[in-house]
Structure formats: C-alpha cells, structure tokens
Image (spheres, rainbow, N blue to C red):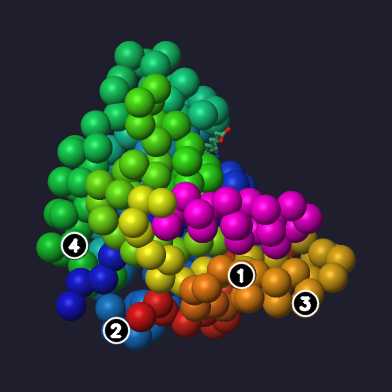
Amino acid sequence: MTTAFFLTGTDTDVGKTHVACALLHRARRAGRTAVGLKPVAAGTDERGDNDDVLRLRAASSLQLPADIVNPYCFAPAIAPHIAAAEDGVEIDFDRIAETVRSARQQADFVIVEGAGGFCVPFGIDRNGADLAAQLQLPVILVVGMRLGCLNHALLTAEAIAARGLIIAGWVANCVTPDMLRFDENLATLEELLLAPLLGVVPYQPGADPEAASDFLELPA
Ligand SMILES: Nc1ncnc2c1ncn2[C@@H]1O[C@H](COP(=O)(O)OP(=O)(O)OP(=O)(O)O)[C@@H](O)[C@H]1O
Ligand SMILES: C[C@H](N)[C@H](N)CCCCCC(=O)O
Ligand SMILES: [Mg+2]
C-alpha cells in the first residue's frame, strides 16, 4: 500500500532534508520503492540545482521527472512567496497535488518535504499548512533539538491539529553536539507532543542520511 507523508520541521535548517533522506533509506531497506518530493525549493547553485532536491533524489530509489520532484524552484535562498513574487510566479497547490498523486502511483513510500517551518507563506493567501491540508497527508515533524525548540514544536503541533491533520511521528534531530539538558528536553517533548517518537538522530558532522536511518523507525 502506498504511504505518503508531509514532512515539516520546527524551522528552516533543522534537518528536514536530512531526516527525509534517512527515512527514504530506511524505507528502501524495508523493501519499499521510496521517493522524496520537494514541491517548493528556494536557493540554487551556479548550475541551477537546489541542494534539497539533489539530496532527496540521491536518497530515492526511483528517479521521477523534475516537474514531479520539484515543480517550483527559485534561485535566491529566501522566503518562497517573496521569490515567487519576484519571478511573477503563483504557487499552484492543485499542480502540486497532481505531482504527489503521480508520485504515489509510482512509488509506495513518498515523502513530501515542506519549506521552512509549517506555516511558511507560499503567497499572500496561502501557506505550507494549507498545502498539507489540501494534500491530506499525515505529518512527520522534525524537531531541531536546540534551545527554543519546545515552543516551536508545540506551536507547530497546534497548527497541524488546527488543520485536522495528525502527526504520524516526530523525530528529534540533534543539530548541535552539546545541547544542555538534552534528556530533559526530549522527555518534555515526548510528554507533550502526543505522537510517536520515530527516533533520535544523533549529531554527526557531514550528516550521512544512510547512517542516520539506523536510528529511525518508519511511521505506521
Ligand atoms: N543530525 C545532524 N548532524 C549534523 N548536521 C546536521 C544534522 N541534521 C542536519 N544537519 C545539517 O544541518 C544543515 C541543515 O539541515 P537540512 O538541510 O536537512 O535542514 P532543512 O530543515 O531541510 O532546511 P531547509 O529549511 O532549507 O529545507 C545541513 O547542513 C545538514 O547537513
Ligand atoms: C531558503 C531556505 N533554505 C528555505 N528553503 C526557505 C525558508 C523560508 C523561511 C521563511 C520564514 O519563515 O521566515
Ligand atoms: Mg530541506
């Protein structure tokens, strides 16, 4: 059966792509055909490539066309709605929903990575939470473990619930090697998030997603 998830995080740069790629590796090890999508990306290199898209592709077991993996890609590494406005582009959720449908027909484990945090604007009248709601996907929440993450995680959980979506699981991603009172912070999140903890991904310089996959369970 196809399973698909919308993967979000407590902020930009908290390890969403790292964890998404690790889960793709984990799913592949379980014999699944796994594909990562990045509907809206911002920030490209001199070749016009976006790093998240390259990493998700490298972790996927099936290579789908660019307009399915990443229908919207903007050059500057800025908030997507600003980049879209500068390019005169409107981010069309129906088009994104079509890419997700197509990916689900071809793969049995699909991860859709959001951009930034859950409510990142995609236009003046739409944001990432609206996209997740339109896609009607269970959410995986990546918590970048650092001071401030408790508030960000709880706000995100409220926003997910407010859209009528469920958290299929959350991941504690160690974005620093030395968070003070790590165990106490983890325990607080376990108590308050009311969703399964899929794993604790350790801090690892270079962040190899295949190695990180050993620390993760697949969401049910
Ligand atoms: N567990 C980890 N150990 C060490 N480095 C990590 C870890 N997780 C993430 N990083 C590093 O932190 C940076 C941000 O991670 P990543 O790109 O996965 O974040 P993101 O949430 O997907 O960001 P964006 O909002 O741009 O999509 C990357 O350089 C990544 O290699
Ligand atoms: C460019 C960056 N890596 C992400 N793709 C976009 C992050 C947008 C964050 C916007 C915000 O919440 O202020
Ligand atoms: Mg990313």
Q: Which residues are magenta?
A: 143-161
The amino acid on which the numbered mark 4 sits, given as a three-letter code, is: Arg
Asked whether residue 150 is drawn in magenta, I would say yes
Marks 1/2: CA–CA distance: 33 Å
Q: Secondary structure at mark 1?
A: helix
Q: Secondary structure at mark 2?
A: loop
Marks 4/3: CA–CA distance: 37 Å
Marks 4/1: CA–CA distance: 32 Å
Pointer 1 or 2: first along the chain: 2
Residue that badge 3 annotates: 183
Pointer 4 or 2: first along the chain: 2
The amino acid on which the numbered mark 3 sits, given as a three-letter code, is: Asp
Residue closest to the eye, 69 or 170: 170
Quarter containing ligand 2? top right
User: Residue 177: horizontal and vertical position, in percent?
Assistant: 80, 66
Quadrant containing the C terminus in the rendered view = bottom left
